[in-house]
């Protein structure tokens, strides 16, 4: 038995466009723009030379390179999709709801010219499509197209459209499909494939492409390296946008020497500078005004609820029910997070998180303080209000007074549980 060793092929394979290229945004969107430009050029020229519209159209068709369109692809399988999609895009402008009459005529001329000029005697021979797919409702609309050109300015076009339409009907050029509402085309929507460059940041916006891509079903199995790289780049862009929006670089400060003078580098006449830590925008510009307004409005709300001095009045009862409801929601969130191995606020001790919220609700029910969860930023749920305020005051002073606005009236504003406290107060304001 004889064997042959593997060897490379004598000839290279030909590079061909896949059919999916012609149904993708890489072909569909630019082609729609080309049709629009063709209609625009014809409209401008027809306003000057209205005598022979089809001769004018053929001249523009050749001048702008449309006559070479059939030589875009030679592979039979890809060419089938190419011709059908191209004819469909022409019909899209003929039967479009908001297209002008002259725009419909130009698209109809283009459809006829493209279908009629398919190469039939080339060598090697090229695949051709013998019919034009059209839904039944679009077909009926096309039959009524000549009657839509009854205006005096469009009267010249009417005879040309009627002649071309009769020629197509005599050649049985149309393949009738079901109603367009049933989406008879394959694919039903163009473009079917949307191309997004790896470095395109529009996927992170609320753009139509982003919304469209977010609605697509996720592929099963492990993500490919390409998908991992794209997600990593998207995460970096998102983080960069957040930092640009929320972080303000602090100014450079000279570094003092041990002798009290500013050190200079060797052979340098400029002082050495150090780069202090970058400050968050809320630390750089604390929202003192909005916080003060919030506390004032909250005080008015509590005064209204406690206007009935009788214990257990309508306002106090409503406040107690709201506190219990928010506490129940936070407990539910905490339990759901625990099932996934996450921590929300129940692991931070008695002065933070869920434990402090429970203590605030308990103090409200016992009449120790008013407001309950609504007064977390004023120290509700903490036993050592004064001591904690002193600690935060020292911390604010050590920061150079930058955060002093946060620690003046409520000692817990700079504590880690302040985030959780604000969240709980926000839940109180949610119906």
Image (cartoon, rainbow, N blue to C red):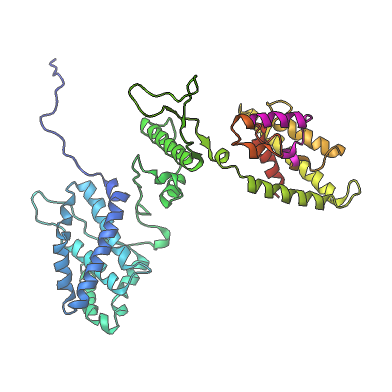
Q: Position of residue 278 (x, y in %)?
A: 50, 33
Is 386 one of the magenta-colored residues?
Answer: yes
Residue 344 visible somewhere in the drawing: no
Q: Position of residue 54 (x, y in %)?
A: 17, 73
Numbered range of the magenta stretch: 375-395
Could you say which is closer to the camera, residue 192 or residue 340? Answer: 340
Compared across the picture, whether 426 is left or right of 93 comes to right
Could you say which is closer to the camera, residue 59 or residue 222? Answer: 59
Is 249 one of the magenta-colored residues?
Answer: no
Q: Quadrant of the N terminus?
A: top left
Compared across the picture, whether 343 is left or right of 210 comes to right
Task: Residue at 68% x, 44% y: name it.
Answer: 426
| Furthest residue in direction top, as rendered | 1
Task: Residue at 77% x, 36% y: name it.
Answer: 380
Q: Quadrant of residue 363?
A: top right
In this picture, is 179 found above or below 369? below
In this picture, is 62 found above or below 211? below
């Amino acid at each position: 038995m004889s064997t042959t060793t593997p060897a490379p092929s004598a000839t290279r394979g030909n590079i061909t466009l896949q059919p999916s290229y012609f149904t993708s945004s890489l072909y569909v969107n630019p082609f729609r723009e080309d049709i629009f430009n063709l209609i625009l050029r014809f409209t401008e020229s027809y306003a000057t030379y209205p005598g022979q519209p089809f001769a004018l159209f053929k001249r523009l068709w050749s001048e702008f390179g449309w006559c070479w369109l059939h030589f875009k692809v030679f592979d039979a399988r890809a060419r089938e999709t190419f011709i059908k999609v191209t004819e469909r895009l022409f019909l899209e402008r003929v039967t479009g709801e908001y297209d002008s009459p002259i725009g419909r005529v130009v698209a109809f001329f283009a459809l006829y010219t493209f279908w009629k000029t398919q190469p039939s005697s080339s060598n090697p021979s090229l695949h051709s499509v013998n019919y034009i797919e059209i839904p039944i409702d679009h077909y009926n609309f096309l039959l009524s197209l000549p009657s839509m050109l009854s205006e005096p300015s469009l009267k010249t076009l009417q005879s040309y459209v009627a002649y071309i339409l009769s020629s197509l009907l005599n050649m049985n050029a149309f393949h009738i499909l079901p109603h367009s509402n049933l989406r008879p085309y394959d694919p039903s929507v163009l473009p079917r494939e949307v191309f997004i460059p790896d470095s395109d940041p529009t996927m992170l916006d609320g753009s139509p492409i982003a919304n469209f891509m977010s609605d697509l079903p996720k592929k099963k199995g492990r993500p490919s390296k390409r998908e991992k790289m794209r997600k990593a780049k998207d995460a970096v862009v998102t983080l960069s946008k957040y930092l640009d929006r929320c972080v303000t670089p602090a100014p450079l400060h000279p570094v003092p020497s041990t002798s009290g003078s500013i050190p200079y580098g060797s052979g340098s006449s400029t002082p050495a500078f150090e780069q202090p830590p970058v400050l968050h925008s809320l630390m750089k510009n604390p929202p003192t005004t909005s916080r003060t307004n919030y506390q004032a409005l909250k005080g008015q709300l509590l005064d209204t609820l406690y206007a009935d001095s009788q214990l257990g009045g309508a306002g106090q009862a409503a406040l107690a029910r709201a506190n219990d409801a928010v506490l129940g929601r936070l407990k539910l969130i905490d339990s759901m997070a625990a099932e996934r191995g996450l921590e929300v606020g129940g692991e931070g001790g008695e002065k933070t998180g869920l434990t402090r919220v429970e203590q605030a609700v308990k103090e409200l029910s016992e009449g120790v303080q008013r407001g309950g969860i609504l007064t977390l930023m004023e120290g509700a749920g903490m036993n050592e209000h004064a001591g904690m305020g002193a600690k935060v005051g020292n911390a604010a002073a050590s920061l150079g007074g930058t955060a002093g606005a946060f620690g003046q009236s409520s000692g817990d504003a700079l504590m880690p549980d302040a985030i959780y406290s604000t969240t709980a107060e926000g839940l109180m304001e949610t119906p």
